[in-house]
Amino acid sequence: MPTPHLLSPLPLGLLNLPNRLVMAPLTRQRSEQPGNIPGPLNATYYAQRASAGLLISEATQVCPEGQGYAWTPGIHSAAQIEGWKQVTAAVHAQQGRIFLQLWHVGRISHPLLQPGGVAPVAPSAIQAKAECYVQEADGSHHKAATALPRALALDELPGVVAAYAQGAANAMAAGFDGVEVHAANGYLLDQFLASNSNQRQDAYGGSAQNRARLVLEVLDAVIAAVGDSHKVGIRISPMGTFGDIHDANPRETFEVLVKALNSRQLAYLHINRPDWLGGSFQGFDELLRSLRDAYQGVLILAGGQDAESGEQAIAEGLADLVAYGRPYIANPDLVERVRRDAPWNQPDASTFYGGGAAGYTDYPTLD
Ligand code: PHB
C-alpha cells in the first residue's frame, strides 16, 4: 500500500472520507437568541467548510446545565433540533459529512448560565481557577470566574448519562452523520477522569477504572441511542491543563480508558494535544505513541498542526486523520490550499467568540 497522506481517502464507519483533514470542534458563540438555536449563518459557515474529510460541530450542550459560555448552541430543545437540521442539510448539499460534539461543561460555568441561577455541577465541590463567559440580565456580557460547583449525588449520575443519550438521539434526528462525546479539555467528563477535580469516595472516584466509569457509561448510552457504534467518536486530552485540570498519572488514566475503547468499535478516538494553546508538556509525545499503539481503531490528532506536521503524523502512522481548528476558522477551503500548496489565511482572534458574519463567514477562498 502506498504511504497515506493528507489527501488520501479513508473509510470511517459507513462514510467514505475523501481526505484526512478534519475540521476540529470550535466554540464560536454565534447561535440565535433567545434559546441558543443554530440558524442560517451557522449553516453557511459549516457548508463553506464541507470539503473537509469530516466536520465536527462546535461543542454543543446536551442540557441547559451543560452550558458554560453565553450563546453556545444546544441539542436539547425542539427548536435547536430544527435549527441544526438547516446546518446538516447545508453541509450535505455540499457533499460534506458532519458529526455533532456532545458537551457538558460541568464546573466550568456560573449561576448566570444555570437554570434557576444555581451553582453548576461537578464530580466534587472543587472550584476551577478558570473563566467562563456570561451575559447579565441587562444584556451586558463579560468573562467571569467559574463558580464553586455542587458535587453531583450518586443518584443524579444516571440523569447525566441520559442527557448525553438524549442529545445523541436529537443529533441523529437533526441529520448528523454521527456524534462525538466530548471527554476533553477540562469539561464534565474530563473532570471525572482527572484526579484533581474528582475526589469522590464512591464507584466514580479513586482508581483510574472508577474515574473512567462515567465516560464509559456515557459512551455506551450514546452508542445505544445512536444505534451504531461506528457513528460515535470520543475526544480526550491526555496531560491537558485547560480548565484547571491536572491528573496525577495521565499515563495510567488514559491507558485504562483507551484499552476499554477497543471493544466498543467506535468511529474514532480523537486526541487533542495538551500544547494546543502553547506551553511545553514533557512526555506527551511518548504517551501519544503508547496510546496510538494501544488503540486499535481510527485516530484523529488535533492541536497546533500545520500541513507539514499533519502530513508527517499520517506518514508516520501516528494518526489516521488530522484535525485543524484555528486554520479552519480562517480557511474554508483548507483542503484546496493543501492540494495546491497555497498559503493559509491567518485567523483574527478578536472575532473568534460572538458577533456575526465578520470573522466567521467572510474569510476569502483562493478563487
Ligand atoms: C471554549 O469554549 O473555550 C472551549 C470549548 C470547548 C473546548 C475547548 C475550549 O474543548
Image (cartoon, rainbow, N blue to C red):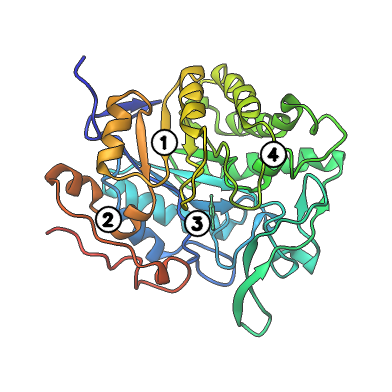
Q: CA distance from mark 3 to mark 2?
A: 24 Å
* Label 1 environment density (alpha carbons within 10 Å; few <14, some 14–19, many ≥20): many
Q: CA distance from mark 2 to mark 1?
A: 20 Å
Q: Which mark is residue 301?
A: 1
- Residue lying at 42% horizontally and 41% vertically, measured from the top left: 302
Q: CA distance from mark 4 to mark 3?
A: 36 Å
Q: CA distance from mark 3 to mark 1?
A: 31 Å
- Label 3 sits on a secondary structure element that is helix
Q: Taking 173 as reference, is 164 left or right?
A: right
Callout in the foreground (4, 3): 4
Q: CA distance from mark 1 to mark 4?
A: 21 Å
**Ligand 1 falls in quadrant:** bottom right
Kindly identify which residue carries mark 3. Answer: 82
Q: Which mark is residue 332?
A: 2
- Please name whichever residue, 173 or 313, is drawn nearer the observer in this view of the structure: 313
Sequence-wise first label, 4 or 2: 4
Q: Which mark is residue 194?
A: 4
